[in-house]
């Protein structure tokens, strides 16, 4: 379990580093939150802390982006916002990613929830007053 408040963007990398430390063995993370809550921004900070070499962006149109870390580990970043039905996840072979042992960061997991492995860490990001965010994982 992890809980933190991001008071400003200057806090985000510190919180991302703490988040990674809180989940040393976990690899699959489902990020829940309203549009604009900061899911992509937080995932970008996590990737920076994990020393990703690639430019991290939302895979809204591609559905999935693959990044590489300095030590050549793969990180898969999913955005299921635009899928029309769950069969689209089967079409690109979600199992190969989710069961690869590599990191998977999933935005809009509500749309494919029946496919999420039982070991998925559910992360909620919600905006509170003055643009601050609460990050919680279960």
Image (spheres, rainbow, N blue to C red):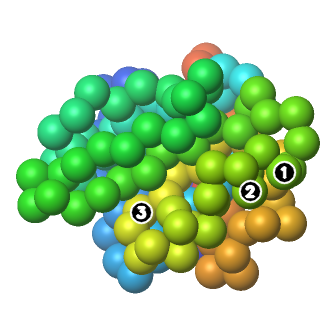
Circle 2: element type: helix
Q: Is residue 39 rendered to the left or right of residue 65?
A: right
Is the N terminus in the top left, top right, bottom left or bottom right quadrant? Answer: bottom right
Q: Nearer the viewer, residue 72 or 137?
A: 72
Q: CA distance from mark 2 to mark 1?
A: 5 Å
In the rendered image, residue 111, in percent from the top left (x then y), is placed at 84, 46
Could you tell me which secondary element the residue under label 1 belongs to?
helix
Disc 3, disc 2: CB below 8 Å? no
Secondary element at image label 3: strand
State the image coordinates of residue 75 (x, y, percent, origin top left).
Answer: 36, 54
Q: How many neighbours does mark 2 have within 10 angstroms: few (below 14), some (14-19), or many (20 or more)?
A: few
* Residue lying furthest left: 70
N-term-proximal mark, 3 vs 1: 1
Mark 3–mark 1 Cα distance, whole angstroms, equals 22 Å
- The front one of 84 and 50 is 84
Rendered residue at 35%/63% (across/down) = 20
Residue position marked by numbered label 2 in the rendering: 90
Q: What residue does disc 3 label?
A: 103
From this view, report whether residue 97 is shown above or below residue 48: below
Residue at x 63% of width, y 80% of height: 119
In the figure, is residue 2 to the left or right of 33? left
Find residue 2 and report its horizontal and vertical position in percent: 53, 66
**Residue 18: quarter of image:** bottom left
Q: Is residue 99 visible?
A: yes
3 or 1: mark nearer the eye: 1
Q: Which residue is mark 1?
A: 87
Quadrant position of the C terminus in the picture: bottom right
Q: Is residue 125 visible?
A: no
């Amino acid at each position: 379990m992890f809980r933190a408040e991001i008071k400003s963007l200057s806090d985000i990398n510190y919180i991302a580093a703490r988040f990674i430390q809180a989940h040393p063995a976990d690899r699959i993370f489902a990020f829940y939150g309203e549009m604009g809550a900061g899911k992509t921004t937080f995932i970008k900070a996590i990737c920076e802390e994990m020393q990703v070499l690639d430019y991290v962006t939302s895979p809204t149109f591609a559905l999935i982006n693959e990044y590489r870390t300095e030590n050549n580990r793969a990180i898969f970043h999913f955005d299921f916002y635009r899928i029309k039905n769950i069969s689209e996840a089967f079409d690109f072979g979600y199992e190969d990613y989710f069961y690869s042992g590599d990191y998977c960061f999933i935005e809009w997991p509500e749309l494919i929830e029946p496919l999420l492995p039982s070991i998925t860490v559910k992360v909620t990001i919600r905006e509170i007053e003055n643009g601050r965010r609460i990050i919680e994982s279960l």
